[in-house]
């Protein structure tokens, strides 16, 4: 059996149905083999697009692993941004790269390059992968692929890369003589009963508990377990960017998005909690603010995470618990009967939600759109102002929604290829993308995949003819010198662009035009909605400088601040 045929057979056996990539001379063996075993090869138009598509595929499918393939040299280096994104957001993805013939590879590290398009991709990606290796012996293929996939899926998940020289791909092997990988026992010790007892005791003694959920609660099982626990105990839940879809949005306990651009009411709730149960969230600066000392000063912070390095390195008063978040939630739900009554606290927070709602045009558009979207919606936001508007205001009714972001890396250009991966992960979902006119152009070539294949994806472009977040920074701190954010930044005519890619176009000038969205949202063909905004757009509220988390701009009046203090005292 040719080695590339064996690779295809092995990937097929572990559930791989799609591979995203861009053809090249050093991967023709593999792509032909994928096709021969019935693995669907999806041709993107830049390898970065393939990397993002495979990332989103992994997030949506909830089982198995996304796969992207690229040729050696520039094909491999084009994957790097997508690999970094998967690493930062803990997404299991298998990246495969072709490599020059083994006899053509440089043998001396001081030589810059031996063969055309030769590059040491392994050294480049080691800091942003959990495992990366070049296959130098054909008989290692089974062991290395099984090892890579196992490492990608265990513990804190993440990307892996297998680099296969072209002559190794074409080598004949006897699959019966291949040795497989034996998984090490890296199981996490169960959280002991004393820790559970302390958590339960803290919850019972608390009057203002809040659960903060992050990407560590992304698995289907973890979400179900948490929803059951929250429903039973009515504990307010706030989320990071990666935890926006953990709790169904019509649940009375779902509060909102926290952080620098978070919902004001969610930040006020978090800042004034007396107990914060942090589930799989990093507590980074965008979540807690730059002044760590001012964060939730009266709160006991209990932090559960599968990655030891994320524990007790941001907050001094943190109680760290190392373990799998799903196991913790599941066992907490099974623990002794808990008697919790947070009804007054929850009512107060919901009053804040009504009082401090966001009313900017973009927020209103996103909120109205939310009411049009059904269950089984996958919404993917790009990076920029559009991402924050979605995080603040997209609230979809249903149990099966997904809201996906490039969180840790914050890669502009993520959304367009990501919706392609999300579509192939589950074609029954309603797939929508949110992006700015800047992010659209980062991977604009992927419109060719969407248009030529007639993928029923809806693309919402917030068109403010600028790089909105950077323009805002230029206005605040650089005397409105808009170089690069407005001046020197341009865009194509989006109607003409849509026509070129055979995608329907709908222009939304104002709020009265929103009915145009509902009229065609169920179409089984791609549509680009061009949402025209003023070229001076803002994300508010916003946390500035060393302000505490509950003190966002535009600042509350002294009357409002005192009112909140009085409400908390009366609780």
Image (tube, grey):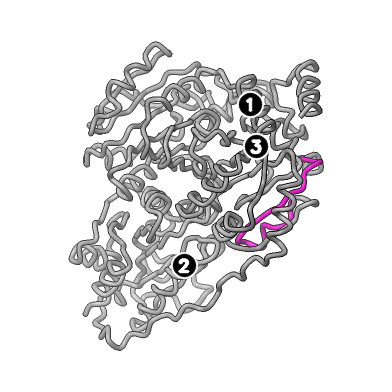
What residue appears at the point 37 percent right and 25 percent down from the top-left corner?
372
Classed neighbour count for the residue bearing mark 3: other residues with Cα under 10 Å, few (<14), some (14–19), many (≥20) = many
Kindly report the distance in space between the C-alpha atoms of the residues bearing marks 2 and 1. Answer: 39 Å
Secondary-structure class at tag 2: loop
Residue 119 relative to residue 320: left or right: left
The residue closer to the viewer here, 120 or 571, is: 571
Kindly report the distance in space between the C-alpha atoms of the residues bearing marks 3 and 2. Answer: 39 Å
Residue 68 relative to residue 82: left or right: left
Q: Position of residue 350 (x, y in %)?
A: 62, 27
Quarter residue 516 falls in: top left
Quarter residue 374 falls in: top left
Residue topped by disc 1 = 474
What segment is highlighted magenta in the picture? 296-314
Secondary-structure class at tag 1: helix
Instruction: Between label 3 and label 2, give the one nearer the viewer.
Output: 3
Q: Residue farthest to the top? A: 512
- The numbered mark, 3 or 2, whose residue comes first in the sequence reads 2
Quadrant where the image shows the C terminus: top right
Residue topped by disc 2 = 120
Classed neighbour count for the residue bearing mark 2: other residues with Cα under 10 Å, few (<14), some (14–19), many (≥20) = some
Kindly report the distance in space between the C-alpha atoms of the residues bearing marks 3 and 1. Answer: 22 Å
What residue appears at the point 56 percent right and 36 percent down from the top-left corner?
254
Quarter residue 76 falls in: bottom left
- The numbered mark, 2 or 1, whose residue comes first in the sequence reads 2
- The numbered mark, 3 or 1, whose residue comes first in the sequence reads 3
Secondary-structure class at tag 3: loop
Q: Count up the numbered dots.
A: 3
Residue topped by disc 3 = 259
């Amino acid at each position: 059996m040719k080695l590339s045929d064996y690779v295809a057979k092995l990937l097929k056996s572990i559930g791989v149905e799609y591979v995203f990539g861009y053809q090249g001379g050093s991967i023709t063996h593999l792509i032909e083999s994928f096709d021969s075993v019935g693995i669907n090869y999806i041709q993107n138009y830049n390898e970065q697009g393939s990397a993002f598509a495979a990332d989103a595929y992994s997030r949506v499918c909830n089982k198995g692993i996304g796969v992207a393939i690229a040729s050696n040299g520039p094909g491999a280096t084009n994957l790097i941004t997508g690999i970094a994104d998967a690493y930062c957001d803990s997404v299991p993805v298998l990246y495969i790269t072709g490599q020059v013939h083994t006899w053509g590879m440089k043998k001396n590290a001081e030589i810059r390059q031996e063969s055309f398009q030769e590059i040491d991709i392994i050294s480049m990606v080691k800091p942003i992968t959990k495992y990366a290796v070049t296959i130098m012996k054909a008989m290692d293929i089974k062991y290395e692929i099984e090892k890579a996939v196992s490492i990608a899926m265990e513990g804190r998940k993440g990307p892996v890369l297998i680099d296969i020289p072209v002559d190794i791909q074409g080598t004949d092997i006897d699959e019966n003589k291949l040795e497989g990988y034996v998984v090490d026992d890296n199981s996490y010790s169960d959280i002991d009963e004393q820790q559970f007892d302390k958590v339960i005791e803290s919850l019972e003694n608390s009057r203002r508990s809040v659960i903060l959920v992050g990407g560590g609660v992304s698995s289907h099982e973890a979400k179900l377990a948490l929803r059951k626990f929250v429903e039973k105990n009515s504990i307010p839940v706030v989320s990071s960017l990666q935890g926006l879809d953990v709790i169904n949005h019509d649940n009375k306990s779902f509060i909102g998005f926290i952080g620098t651009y978070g919902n004001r009411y969610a930040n006020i709730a978090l800042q004034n909690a007396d107990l914060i149960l942090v589930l799989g969230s990093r507590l980074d600066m965008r979540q807690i603010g730059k002044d760590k000392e001012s964060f939730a000063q009266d709160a006991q912070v209990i932090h559960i995470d599968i990655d030891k390095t994320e524990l007790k390195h941001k907050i001094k008063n943190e109680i760290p618990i190392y373990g799998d978040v799903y196991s913790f939630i599941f066992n907490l739900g099974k623990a002794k009967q808990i008697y919790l009554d947070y009804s007054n606290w929850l009512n107060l927070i919901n009053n804040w939600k009504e009082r401090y709602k966001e009313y900017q045009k973009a927020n209103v558009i996103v909120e109205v759109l939310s009411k049009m979207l059904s269950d089984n919606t996958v919404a993917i936001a790009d990076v920029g102002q559009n991402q924050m508007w979605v995080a603040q205001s997209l609230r979809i009714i249903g149990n099966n929604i997904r809201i996906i972001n490039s969180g840790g890396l914050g890669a502009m250009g993520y959304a367009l290829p990501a919706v392609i991966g999300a579509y192939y992960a589950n074609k029954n979902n309603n797939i929508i993308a949110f992006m700015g006119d800047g992010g659209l152009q980062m991977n604009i070539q992927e419109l060719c995949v969407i248009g030529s294949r007639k993928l029923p994806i809806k693309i919402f472009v917030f068109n403010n003819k600028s790089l909105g977040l950077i323009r805002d920074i230029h206005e605040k701190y650089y005397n409105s010198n808009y170089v690069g954010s407005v001046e020197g930044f341009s865009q194509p005519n989006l109607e003409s662009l849509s026509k070129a890619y055979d995608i329907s176009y709908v222009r939304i000038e104002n709020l009265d035009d929103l009915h145009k969205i509902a009229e065609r949202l169920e179409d089984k063909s791609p549509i680009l909605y061009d949402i025209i905004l003023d070229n001076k757009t803002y994300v508010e509220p916003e946390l500035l400088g060393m302000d505490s988390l509950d003190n966002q701009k535009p600042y509350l009046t002294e009357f409002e601040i005192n009112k909140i203090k009085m409400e908390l005292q009366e609780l």
